[in-house]
Image (tube, rainbow, N blue to C red):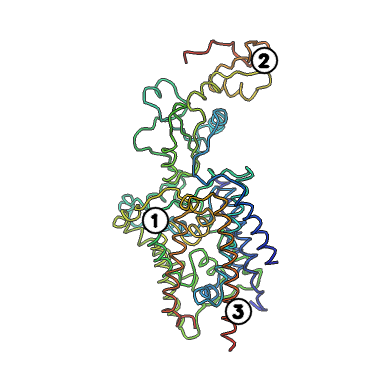
Amino acid sequence: MNGAAKPYSNPYLAGVGLGLVLLAAFIAAGRGLGASGAFASAAASVASRVSPERVAGNPYFARYLAQPGGPWKDWLVFELAGVVLGGFLSALAAGRLRREIERGAAVSRKTRLALAFAGGGVMGAGAVLARGCTSGQALTGGALLSVGSWVFMLAAFAAAYLVAPILRWAWR
Amino acid sequence: MIASLAMAFAIGIAFGWTLERAGLGSAKKLVGQFYLTDLTVFKVMFSAIATAMLGVFWLARLGLLDLGQVWIPQTFLAPQLVGGLIFGCGFACAGLCPGTSCVAAASGRGDGALVVAGMFCGVLATGASFGALQTFYESGAEGTFTLPELLHLPYGVVVAIVVVVALLGFRLAERLERRAAAHASR
Amino acid sequence: MERTLAAIALVLGGLAAISGAPQPSGRPPGISALDLAAAIRDGHGGPDSPWVMDLRSKNEWGERRVPSAQHAEGPIEGPTDHDRTLVLYANASTPIEATAASLRAAGYRRVYVLEGGMDAWLDQVMHPQVSAGDDRVIELSRYFGGLPRARGGSPTAVATSAVAPARPRGGC
C-alpha cells in the first residue's frame, strides 16, 4: 500500500458508533456481540472430527455441536466472519492494509509471534471459564448491567494492569 | 434461520468496521491502555457501553423494546472472576482481544493471526479438559443478575451512575494522556 | 463535539434516573393465545414454529392440549436450536416463571408464557366470541377445529358461512 494511512477516528465517536451497532444487535437479534463463542464452535467442530466419541461425552462441546445446522451455522460464527470482512474493508478504505508484525523495536518477530500465540491461548482458557470475552461479556453484558459481566471486565483489566509492567520490554 | 445468520453477518461487518476505524486492530495502540499512554480502548469501550445502555433503557422506557426479548448474559461469579483474571493476563501478553485480533489479522497483521490461532488452541484445550472444570464452571450461578438488583436501586438510577462514572473516567483519561505525552516529549 | 456528546449522555442519563422504568428483570414475556395460534399455524411444524410445552399434569395434557404441545415433566428437554421460540403454559393460576427462568438460564432466548394459560386457549381460540369482521379470529379458530360463537348470541350478526352455531359454554 502506498500513501499515508488516514488517521484513526475520534475514539468517542467510534465508541458511539460501536454502541449503536451493539444496540442494533439487541433490537434485531435479541442478543449482543461476541467473538469467543465462534472460536468455541470452531473448536467443537474440529474436536468432533478428531475424536467423535470423546466429544460426544463433553458437555461443553456438545452444546455447540447441537446447533441444528451443525456448529458452523451459528449466529456468532457468521457475526465473526462479518468482523473479519468489516475490519478488512475498513483497513482497505483507510489505506491501512499492510503485511506487518506489530512489535516493540527491541523484540524479534519470533518473540512477538510467540507472545501473541501464548497470549491468545491464555485468553482462550479465560474466555471458556468466563463464558465470553471483551465482546460478549464486557461490552454486551456491560451495557445490559449484568453483574457477572462487570466482574469479568474489572477482573480482566485488573489482571492486565498487574501483568503489563512485566511485559513492558515487549512493546518498547 | 438464514435471515438471522445474514443479520449476524451484517452486524459483524459493522462491528469489525468500527473496531478498525477506532484503531483497535493495532496491538501497539491497544496496549497503550495498559501503560496509560493511549486510552483509546477505555474511551471506545465505555462510549459504546454508555450508548448501548442508554439506547436499551430509553427504547424499553418508551415501549419500543421488550427487555424480556434481550438475552442478558447470566452471572456465574467465581468462574467469571477467575476467567476474567486469566483472560486479562492473556490480553496484556497478546496485545489484542479475541474480536480485535480478527480485525488485526484481517488488516494484514501477522501478530493478529497468531493471536487468533492461539485463541483457537486455548479454547480447544480448555474445552477438551472440561470434565475437570465443569464443577467450577457451573459454580456461583446467580442466573440473570443485574447491577440494579445488586445495588437495590432503580434501573434508571444505575444508568445515570454509569454515565457519570464514564464521563469522569473520560476526563481522567484525557488528563493521563496529556501527562504521558508531556513525559514522553521531555 | 466531545462536549456535545457528553452533554447528551448526561441529559439522557439524568432523565433516566428520574423517569421510573422497567427493571431488566429477565421475566419472561407473555404471548396471547391468538398470537400463539397464528404462530403454530404459520410455522407448519417447521423450525420457525413455536416449541410448546404443557406444564400441567399428564392427565390434563392427555385430555386436552394446545396442538403440538409436549408434556413437560421433570428435567425439561428443550429443542436443540436455542433461537427457537419456546412457549410454556399451565393452568391460568399455576406459576411457571421459575421454569421459564431455568430455560432462559439454559440458553434459550425466546421463552414466552401463554397469557391466561390453557383457559385462555379454550376461550380465545377454541370457543371465541366473535362479531362481524373478526375474520382473523374466526379463521384461526376454525383452523384448530374451534367453534366461534357470535357475540351477544345473535349468529346473524356474523358472516354466517364463517361461524358455527353457538354452543353452550361451560363444561369445558
Q: Nearer the viewer, mark 2 or mark 1?
A: 1
Residue at 50% across / 55% down in the picture? A141
Label 3 is placed on what type of residue? Arg
- Which residue occupies the foreground of this view, C161 or A104? A104
* Helix, strand or loop at mark 1: helix
In percent of width and height, residue B59 lies at 62, 47
Residue that badge 2 annotates: C158
- Which residue occupies the foreground of this view, B44 or B103? B44
Q: Residue furthest bottom?
A: B186
* Helix, strand or loop at mark 2: loop
Residue that badge 3 annotates: B178
Answer whether labels 2 and 1 touch (C-beta < 8 Å): no
Residue that badge 1 annotates: B77
In percent of width and height, residue A25 lies at 58, 52
Label 2 is placed on what type of residue? Val
Q: How many marks?
A: 3
For the residue carrying disc 3, how many other residues have a C-alpha within 10 Å: few (<14), some (14-19), or many (20+)? some
In percent of width and height, residue B129 lies at 31, 59
- Give the alpha-carbon distance from disc 3 to disc 2, as whole Å: 77 Å
For the residue carrying disc 2, how many other residues have a C-alpha within 10 Å: few (<14), some (14-19), or many (20+)? many
* Helix, strand or loop at mark 3: helix
